[in-house]
Image (spheres, helix red, strand yellow):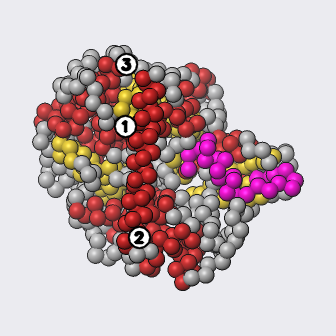
Amino acid sequence: MESHGLMSDLSKHILRLPPKQLAIQAKCFHPSATFVEFSEKEIEQSIPERFEKMVGLYPERLAVKTKNLCWTYEDLNQAANHIAHAILAQGGEGEEPVALLLEHGAEVIAVILALLKTGKIFVPLDPKLPHTRNNSILGDTQTGLIVTNSRHLSDAAQIQERLHLINIDEPTAISSAENVGSSISPDNLAYILYTSGSAGQPKGVVQNHRNVLQQIRKETNGLHICADDRLILLRSCSAIGGVRIVLSALLNGAVVYPLNVAQVGFTELVELLAQEEITIYDSTPTTFRQFVTVLTDEQRFPYLRLIRLSSEPVHKQDVELYNEHFPGACIFVNSLGLTETAGSIRCNLIDHNTHVASDTVPVGYPVEEMEVVLLGDDGHEVGSREIGEIAVRSRYLSPGYWRSPDLTRAKFVADPTGGDQRLYLTGDLGQLLPDGCLVHLGRKDFQIKVRGYKVDVAEIERALLALDPIKAAVVIARADRLDEQCLVAYLVTSKNSSLTISSLRRGLSEVLPDYMIPSSFVMLDAMPVTPTGKVDRSALPAPDRTRPILDDVYVTPRSESEKLLAGIWHEVLHIEKIGIDDNFFDLGGNSLRLAQAHRKVGEVFGKEIPLTEMFAHPTINTLAKYLTRKPDEQRALKQSHDRAQTRRALSHRRSRTRKNRT
């Protein structure tokens, strides 16, 4: 839609929360009642200033805790300061992008704070992404520096050899625990977060310190986050959801618990929630559904006061699961957040007395300083219950897209009514109910959300078409038997092609992250088309449940262990025929499905094994052998694996040392 077509008489909606929402919000307090309001004047500073205020108030209070590390606010501040001084010594002062490449955990939080303290713009890279994708982000930002650790040093070198590297595990000549004292304006940029663009290319959303603080202020005051809260961090800090959780905790004196559930499994999540008395749970609906499957009737989590879901549609069944498994004082929150707005634009509070009528749960009511209107194709506002594009009007929108002025002008337009606000055209469709509640109806284009990630199918289609035998490719999202959104690719290949799903996945994994690799592939003789010659996506057939064409020939399960594992895989993947040499991921599995299989393996075999062993043994053949080994053999195998990893790390370090000397 062209910006000049926007309505000129856009009215300002000042919608107050209905009495039911106000009543639930009145119960949304920590039992300690230590909530302190985040005042409006406090957004006129930098993020580090607010954090350092918390350090002064709560130096000995726990800030970050993982399985192997506990940092107080003073500890975290000193760790961030050490890194900040090293960054300034290497890159000097100035507002410029600096990348960080670290795994999910405490270190990434310290580095984010360090970069913010120096006045740099942090650009998070995800170690799980292909090197080509991270390289594309680095090329777009034109950063000259990557902050990483020993574990990812070789990855950083492979992404960009020309860049300067800071290894936070190595001591530096510049080592100070004192605050760096950089002068940072609220207008300075804080980060660049990359999401899939509507044109199929990743786009960098920039945000400044003032807007981030305004969003954290809304989170704090709306959900009454306080210093006694304990927040679980399941989301990646390379996405807005992860950044929001970290800052909601650390800018209020609360504690954050990073946990990589894809690595450790949902049983450990359950234990952590109970043992650490977590008060705020925040995840995608997909993760929530997997988490609930491991709960028993006895597990009620009496300290949990908020369950918040976002990034994907929330269904009535999710609220029913909440009612079944969580205590009466716990409140369920469904929200709609956007990277371009630094967080929530709508919020729906639900308690155990709330009746949910429709299958899709509305995303709710206005939050402060974020006005939502729905626009028709003519650019004018549509009426109640009519469907239109969701547009957000605010003075706290993103400044735009990094190095993309045309896209910025197309998506961020001047407020037709004048003033200092702008309008962001989201590309999402919505419907307003008579009481002002918003129902989110998905994307206008083919950009969708899968497992909490925003995905543009055009990018996947181009990656498929780059593979030699593929002549046509269409990717859509379909709900599977568990009502989860899964990507399905429809392909037309050249005649006599010997293409296998195994080789397809290998090719895609070199250019796409795992969440963008389709779960299913359907081979067609030709694409169905409409009378106008366009692909008729509604006529694409549902994928069948037969075993796909793989590199390995089918070998039937023989032993009792192999048959039991085949049954588990069938239950999780819904594939009718599974061979013992078939790779779990080639069959359409992902990390969350593997965690589900991990739980079932523990139940069926009566033994708990590390989730990492499921990743290490992705076939029935190898996993059955591992399960039937004696404990001594398993320990010896692990020790051998650890020694091999150590040798590789030492070899890489010696290689880098020789290179540096040269």
Q: Which mark is residue 633?
A: 2
What's the residue at 54%, 22% (across, down)? 403
Tell me the residue at 59%/26% (across/down): 407
* Whether residue 580 is situated above or below residue 250 in the rendered picture: below
Amino acid type, label 2: Glu
Q: Is 495 colored magenta in this rendering? A: yes
Query: How many other residues sit within 10 Å of disc 1, few (<14), some (14-19) or many (≥20)?
Result: many
Q: Secondary structure at mark 3?
A: helix
Residue 502 x/y as whole percent: 67, 57
Specify the label residue 614 is tagged with.
none
Q: Quadrant of residue 90?
A: top left
Pick the residue in front: 207 or 607: 607
Mark 3 lies on residue: 91
Residue 371 position (above or below residue 27): above
Could you say whether the residue bearing mark 2 is in a helix, strand or loop? helix
Which is nearer the eye, 583 or 321? 583
Task: Please give left or right for residue 517 compared with residue 59 in the image.
Answer: right
Residue in the picture at 37% in, 66% down: 635
Of badges 1 and 2, nearer the viewer stands: 2
Amino acid under disc 1? Asn
Q: Which residues are magenta?
A: 491-514
Q: Position of residue 419 (x, y in %)?
A: 43, 20
- Density class for disc 3 (Cα within 10 Å; few <14, some 14-19, many ≥20) is some
Q: Which residue is mark 1?
A: 149
Q: In the depicted view, which residue is nearer to us: 657 or 378?
A: 657
Q: Evaluate whether residue 568 shows in this view.
A: no
Q: Is residue 128 left or right of residue 586?
A: left
Instruction: Measure how far apart labels 3 and 2 are at the Cα level.
Output: 49 Å
The image quarter containing residue 519 is: bottom right
